[in-house]
Image (spheres, helix red, strand yellow):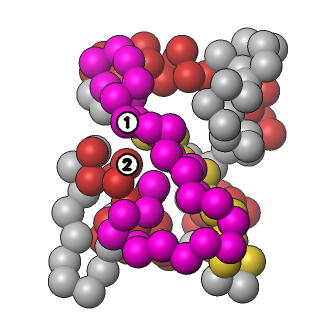
Amino acid sequence: MPMTDEVFDAVTDGSGGGDLGFWRLPGGFDTLLAQWSAAGPIAYVEAEYFGGVGEQRAAVWADGSLALGPLDEPTKKRFSRAVSPISQALRRLGARRSLGEDEFEAVGLDRHRTNEDWISSAC
């Protein structure tokens, strides 16, 4: 689910949200993610790319607490897709890749490049 302004406003508790190092994690949302993870693992991921270079951050909550991360890769550093933060988080959620692809592609996250494209495809 893309983190739109509307979703951000709906899930924030108004506190500062910078403790885990994410760009757009709403204040208090990590507590809500931990609560939701009692029913099954849940990930929060962020990616920002331009011209093939960028950054990823990811964390996974399971059984009511932070189970992986937060993981990040700094800007301008190229990394193996298999060890990218998002691929690691997706593996923790149970994603499996085929030869020649990573977990990001295996679950179809490569279909759209912007939040706006994801939102318009859901309508």
| Residue 80, x across and y down, in percent | 41, 74
Name the residue tied to disc 1: 68
In the rendered image of this protein, does residue 41 appear above or below residue 119? above
In the rendered image of this protein, does residue 5 appear above or below residue 27? below
Asked whether residue 17 is drawn in magenta, I would say no
Query: Residue at horizontal 28%, vertical 45%?
Result: 93
Kind of residue indicated by mark 1 = Leu
| Callout 1 touching callout 2 (CB < 8 Å) | yes
Kind of residue indicated by mark 2 = Ala
19, 89: nearer the viewer: 19
| Residue 28, x across and y down, in percent | 65, 16
Q: Please state which of the two labelled residues, at mark 1 or mark 2, is closer to the viewer.
A: 1
103, 6: nearer the viewer: 103
Q: Quadrant of residue 15?
A: top right
Q: Describe residue 49's horizontal placement relative to residue 89 as left or right.
A: right
Name the residue tied to disc 2: 89
| Residue 3, x across and y down, in percent | 67, 44
Q: Describe residue 85's horizontal placement relative to residue 72 as left or right.
A: left
106, 21: nearer the viewer: 21
Give the CA distance from mark 1 to mark 2: 7 Å
Label 1 vs 2, first from the N-terminus: 1
Tally of numbered tags? 2
| Residue 82, x across and y down, in percent | 33, 69
In the rendered image of this protein, does residue 70 appear above or below residue 122? above
Region rendered in magenta = 56-85
Query: Residue at horizontal 45%, vertical 55%?
Result: 85
Instruction: Please tell me whether mark 2 sits on a helix, a strand or a loop.
Output: helix
Asked whether residue 68 is drawn in magenta, I would say yes
117, 75: nearer the viewer: 75
